[in-house]
Image (tube, coloured by chain):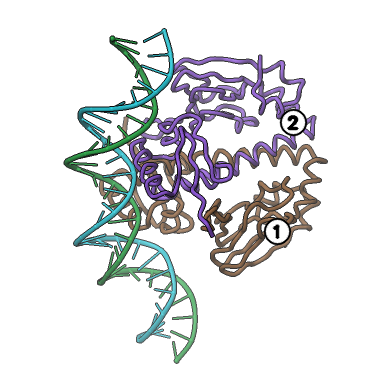
Chain colours: A purple, B brown, C green, D cyan
Amino acid sequence: MILPTALKALLPPTSHALCEGARYSKNEQLFLTGKKPEWMFYVVSGEVTLERTGLQGEPVVLQRTRQGFVSEASLKSAKYHCDALAIIDTTVVKIPIREISAELDRDPAFASRWIGMLNSEVRRLRLHCERLSMKSVKDRVLHLINTEGQNGTYTAATGLKSLAGELGVTHEALYRTLAALEKAKIIQRLDGVLSLHILQG
Amino acid sequence: MILPTALKALLPPTSHALCEGARYSKNEQLFLTGKKPEWMFYVVSGEVTLERTGLQGEPVVLQRTRQGFVSEASLKSAKYHCDALAIIDTTVVKIPIREISAELDRDPAFASRWIGMLNSEVRRLRLHCERLSMKSVKDRVLHLINTEGQNGTYTAATGLKSLAGELGVTHEALYRTLAALEKAKIIQRLDGVLSLHILQG
DNA sequence: CGTACTTTTGAATCGCATCAAATCTGGTGG
DNA sequence: CCACCAGATTTGATGCGATTCAAAAGTACG
């Protein structure tokens, strides 16, 4: 089992061998509400949603992950509180909750790294919320470049259509907005790389 | 210093005496980018924003907190990475970072509670993101009742206008949507309490 | 070369923001 | 107690921006 670099640095070396790779086909379920959590999942590729059934029986999506942890927040839970579904073909790393949880109590340095990971997650999610509460696509794109970009440059690794989903807009709206921003010389585009034009102060 | 119940249960008793209450007036700053973090802030009432200056000099809001932690994610940082501003008169509890950080390394039970707190925060933020990526006000309201409510009932403690802000819509749109949902017998309203009508299966 | 997917542009429609204004509310001071 | 004010709540009218539906052009891959 080859772990992604981020996971390797985070988890204690003794736990690496306990992790397992797994693949899920489109529409396959990773876990179900009410089951006892045994694994945490780290999405390497594909897309996983966490869903709950609303009071009227309609599905309510709680989370959507293309890369990173799913259900790391059920580390201390007695049972899963939602269903996990691979909505396209997906590759994950399965991490044994029991061992990780015990290790967290035993190894303060690991707990400290784990807290650091959660801190980053909180920060990123807050940025995401702030972005999604902006009304125009233009504002969301500029906020994205300003907050997620490196030095005024953001790389859309998974394609613009996928980016549109993350920004909470249709891909048509995103394409049009990018074209307009480029025409107005506010940004430049090369492949999937968006760069702010530097304003001379 | 009287701590809010949630804080009291979370922090180790030895640290309670080290916390301080504080008040900030509208437009007063809690901390500035680049300064060494000495305090974490827990907002009791009012509203605090974290802001950063964009590449074109415009302010970019990273977070907006009416209740709960601000900057708990800078627990392990060498310096603040943004500015904190009270946008209305605000009351907070100041928590000494140095002592809390040391205590986290020393007290595994506290670290475990802290991880639990961060897990809740991550869950709530993910729900919030999911809600904000819904296109219609109606969907956002129903998602709110389904996920944040108790048994189909959500209580808007801070008023509907404030709720509109959290939902990322104007207060006019929220009022109209609530009126329409009530007229369609999908929800009921009493004061600030929103309840789903039960569908009989 | 054909299939599937992304990227792009066009046109029509709709929901929400915006601007305006009226009503209602709680709190303050005369 | 009443006049008054600041906010919250509500309803109305208008316009814009994003969604939606459609279709064409570009791209990757077997």
**Residue A104 badge:** 2
Tell which of B53 and C7 is nearer to you. Answer: C7
* Mark-to-mark CA distance, 2 and 1: 27 Å
Q: Which residue is mark 1?
A: B94
Q: Residue at x 62, y 21 (%)?
A: A39
Chain letter of disc 1?
Answer: B
Instruction: Say if residue A144 shows up in the picture.
Output: no
Q: What's the amino acid at mark 1? A: Lys
Residue placed farthest to the right in the image? B106
Disc 2 crowd, CA 10 A, few/some/many (<14, 14-19, 20+): many
Residue B139 picture quarter: top left
Residue A27 picture quarter: top left
Q: Is residue A118 above or below residue B137?
A: above
Disc 1 crowd, CA 10 A, few/some/many (<14, 14-19, 20+): some
Q: In the rendering, at what x and y percent does residue A15 appear?
A: 73, 21
Q: In the rendering, at what x and y percent does residue A162 appear?
A: 43, 31
Element at label 1: strand
The N terminus of chain B lies in which quarter of the figure? bottom right
Tell which of A126 and C24 is nearer to you. Answer: A126
The C terminus of chain B lies in which quarter of the figure? top left
Tell which of B65 and A125 is nearer to you. Answer: A125
Residue placed farthest to the front in the image? A200
Q: Is residue A24 above or below residue A123?
A: above
Tell which of B48 and A140 is nearer to you. Answer: A140
Q: In the rendering, at what x and y percent does residue A70 appear?
A: 56, 28
Q: Is residue B5 above or below residue A4?
A: below
Q: What's the amino acid at mark 2? A: Leu
Residue A54 picture quarter: top left
